[in-house]
Amino acid sequence: MSALGKALVVFGVVAVVIGLALWFGGRWFGWLGKLPGDIRIEGDKGGFYFPVVTCIVISVVATIVLSLIRRFFGN
């Protein structure tokens, strides 16, 4: 049960750090959502936006972080 507690604390700390970085560090993450390959279609009455490349980047980063956490806590 202590491993579950450690994992919850780590996930909580990571979530807080990411949240603070996005909140206060807008200039550092200003490129997020504006990468080449993100689909943006704008018209007179509205628009459509789908961040394809941004989703891929976030997925790769999350996979690496979760892999490191899994190795750290062992399986």
Image: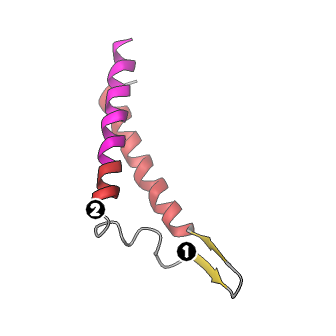
Residue placed furthest toward the top = 1
Q: Earlier in the sequence, mark 1 or mark 2?
A: 2
Amino acid found under the numbered disc labelled 1: Asp
Pick the front one: 17 or 54: 17
Magenta part of the chain? 1-18
Residue extending farthest right: 45
Return the mark for residue 38.
Answer: 1
Q: Position of residue 24 (x, y in %)?
A: 28, 58
Q: Residue at x 38, y 26 (%)?
A: 8
Query: For numbered disc 2, what is the local secondary structure?
Result: loop
The residue indicated by pointer 2 is: 25
Q: How many marks?
A: 2
Q: Is residue 49 left or right of residue 12?
A: right
Judge left or right: residue 21 versus residue 33: left
- The colour scheme is secondary structure
Could you tell me which secondary element the residue under label 1 belongs to?
loop
Give the x, y percent position of residue 1.
Answer: 39, 11
Which amino acid type corresponds to the residue marked 2 in the rendered image? Gly
Residue at 55% from the left image edge and 68% from the top image edge: 51
Q: Which mark is residue 58?
A: none
Badge 2: residue crowd in 10 Å (few <14, some 14–19, many ≥20): few
